[in-house]
Image (cartoon, rainbow, N blue to C red):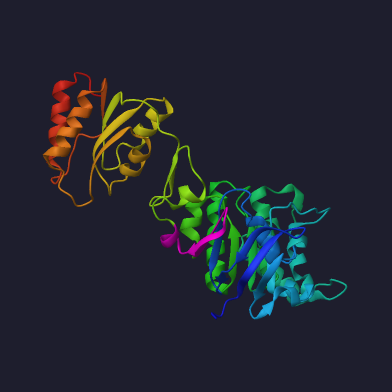
Amino acid sequence: MADYSLHTERLSVGYNGRPVLERLDFGVNRGELVTLIGPNGAGKSTLLKSLAGQLAPVAGTAYIGKDALADISADALSRRLAVVFTERLRTELMTCRDVVATGRYPYTGRFGILSKEDRKKVAEAMELVQLNGLADADFQSISDGQRQRVMLARAICQETEIILLDEPTSYLDVKHKLEFLSLLQRMAREKKLSVIMSLHELDLAGKVSDKLVCIGKNGVERVGTPREVFVQGYISELFSITAGSFDEASYAMEPEAPKGAPEVFVLAGAGSGRETFRELQRKGIPFATGIIFESDLDYPVARALAANVVSAGACEHIGNKRLQRAKELAASCKRVICCRRDFAPWEPENRELYRELKKNFAALE
């Protein structure tokens, strides 16, 4: 058996003896950032609460190191595992420093009196998450992003080997999402922490995680690296996507494509057409596009939103057949939008297509 910091053996979790997830087997190494992904209601939060010892397992066992979770006392568990969950902490007249300091309670004894060493740990944790300027601020008066960093600082100064987080970016804007997740990555690497969290943002999960645990209607369906999980079609299957699409290669989500025969032909490629495709989709105008290489930045969006796409493989010669197909599609449309007028030496067909469109459509957009 691998030397995991946390692992499960046929673990079933749920409420009142009724399982939500059954027979879970996965492990987390030291220094590894692992993210749970899956649809709402699949059981991600239930699993995290069970790993935190807040819910008793229905069956099976979770282990921290070689010790069964059920055999670890509450005091001992608080020295080995910290939690940052979405429930709002209820505080009254507590500064940010006071809240962070509660992370030292597993070490302070019955009266909770901080030693000089404890205060040093609190200060170091606050400095690590860049909270020094807020140390004396009322915890209830700060922003959601700042509050989340305070809770992470509390977990850090608890000095555990594992941190569990349930949707830690829920209340954060883009800037603070990136800062928070970058900090978690750095903590995992530098302090050899095992970080286990759930995320709704699939693009961020794919970018920051060492390993993904995919939880669907049948429990844990897949465990692997982002490269192993984000294979074509799997995320759509996991989330039962029926309207719109998710492109596993680019982590891009697109809404549902307009219905009907194409009314506009878009000459795109070299990343020039994506915003035009999305503008047409917002207006409900079906369109066709080409000739686009499948390695092009335009291609995932075109495939998701266009009624017809004329494409060629990444290193493939376009050829006359694709050129004629593009000309036919353009001729059947009412309008043409040219997003580009300059073409690479290896795409003479697109240059010819542009000349044809310029000749046949008096008003190129």
Q: Is residue 212 magenta?
A: yes
Toward which corner of the image does residue 19 lie, by quadrant? bottom right
Q: Which residue is outermost to the right? A: 111
**Left or right of 358: which side holds 46?**
right
How far across and how far down the image is residue 116, in percent?
A: 76, 76
Figure quadrant of the N terminus: bottom right
Q: Residue at x 36, y 25 (%)?
A: 260
Q: Residue at x 19, y 52 (%)?
A: 315
Whether residue 333 is visible here, answered yes or no, is: yes
Is the residue 347 above or below the residue 61 in the image?
A: above
Q: Residue at x 45, y 38 (%)?
A: 244
How far across and how far down the image is residue 312, in percent?
A: 22, 45
Q: Residue at x 74, y 53 (%)?
A: 137
Is the residue 145 above or below the residue 135 in the image?
A: above
**Left or right of 302: which side holds 92?**
right
Q: Is residue 243 magenta?
A: no
The one of 349 and 257 positioned closer to us in this rendering: 257
Residue extent of the magenta highlight: 211-229
Is the residue 56 above or below the residue 348 in the image?
A: below
How far across and how far down the image is residue 122, in percent?
A: 71, 68
